[in-house]
Image (tube, rainbow, N blue to C red):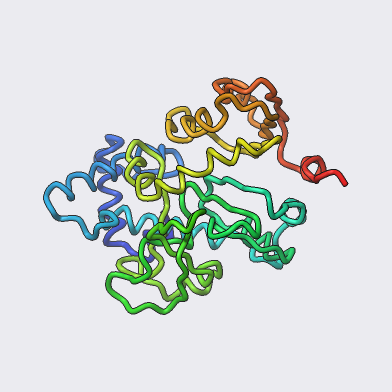
Amino acid sequence: MLLFKSECPGVFERVKNYTQMAFGLGSTDPDYRKLGFSDLCTFLDYVELQESGGRERWSDNGCRERLVLKHYLGKAVIDKTPEPDSVPELYRAFAAQLLESDVVITFNWDCLLENALAAVGKLYTYGANDQCTLLYKMHGSVHWRIGNQPRVFPSQLSWQPVEFVGGHKSGLYFSDDLLRQESWENTEPIGGEAEPFLVLPGYGKAKDVQTVQRLWYKPAGFFALAQQVYVIGLSLAPDDFFVRSFLLHALFDWNGRITVINPDPAARANYSFLPCQHLSYRLEKFALSHVKEMQPSS
């Protein structure tokens, strides 16, 4: 939010006003560290609904405030993501042991795994073929966008389509240029190329998920062929009905083993809804010992 405020103060003030309304703050400046991000996103979803009804929305991809918020979320995430030559050993080791037959399903927006795979010289795909590790980014990515043409400015980055298994077109495009922090320096927050497709938390996420419905259709089938599933550090919100429903559907009548690696003491209660007979917990931070456990036996 500090980055948002310093680089795009006009739109930031509008978001600030909406935040004051959403949390009943009156004229008090919001302390965003203490406010529920999901609640703010839900209010912005309402703003988008209002603008859509009055045909006042900035673009078909969303209201201006919500799109600019996504831009600065993406920029802040990229700023904190280590590039391939700086990826910690833990994540290099995790990437190194992945096989072409492995599938990684993530609800994160960052590109730490892509950079880790690049660091160890491994290929990956978002679903175009089965010749390398599949990454399924269920909530989008900081380097994805809807369509490959910005609204206002000419394209300066290299864009490729995100194709799903079976060759299905998604309407989404990704640019590896945006994995580098310097590529964000000259991007415009309004109408520019770095307009990340991110599924935000809150009750309005159904609209964004609907945009990538094919992405949500296929992964449940991957579990049928799996013998072992690891859930690593997933902070599953109690009201995240989409992710909970996805796991219920994917693991219904599944007989494999699932291991939840999460230091949160509440993890057992949080995942008690899973209909899995062979469910175990490691209430500890993800570590190299877990990676060694995942490595296929010779």
Vertical order, 200 against 230 (above or below): below
Q: Nearer the viewer, residue 134 or 150?
A: 134
- Position of residue 260 relative to residue 33, above or below, is above
Q: Residue pushed farthest front? A: 166
Q: Quadrant of residue 292?
A: top right
Tell me the residue at 51%/53% (across/down): 165
Residue 254 x %, y %: 61, 27
The residue that appears at 49% across and 74% down in the rendered structure is 183
In the rendered structure, the answer to whether residue 241 lies left or right of residue 204 reads right
Give the residue at x 71% y 25%. Answer: 280
Position in image of residue 101 (x %, y %): 68, 50
Query: Is residue 16 or residue 117 the one in the foreground?
Result: 117
Q: Provide residue 285's location: percent of width, then percent of height.
A: 71, 38
Q: Closer to the camera, 212 or 191?
A: 212
Which image quadrant: the N terminus? bottom left
Q: Quadrant of residue 40?
A: top left
Looking at the image, residue 286 lies above or below residue 109: above
What residue is at 43 percent from the left and 48 percent from the top? 214
Q: Residue furthest right?
A: 298
| Lateral position of residue 194 relative to residue 84, left or right | left
**At which x and y percent is residue 120?**
74, 63
Q: Count how many numbered circles sit on residues in the image.
A: 0
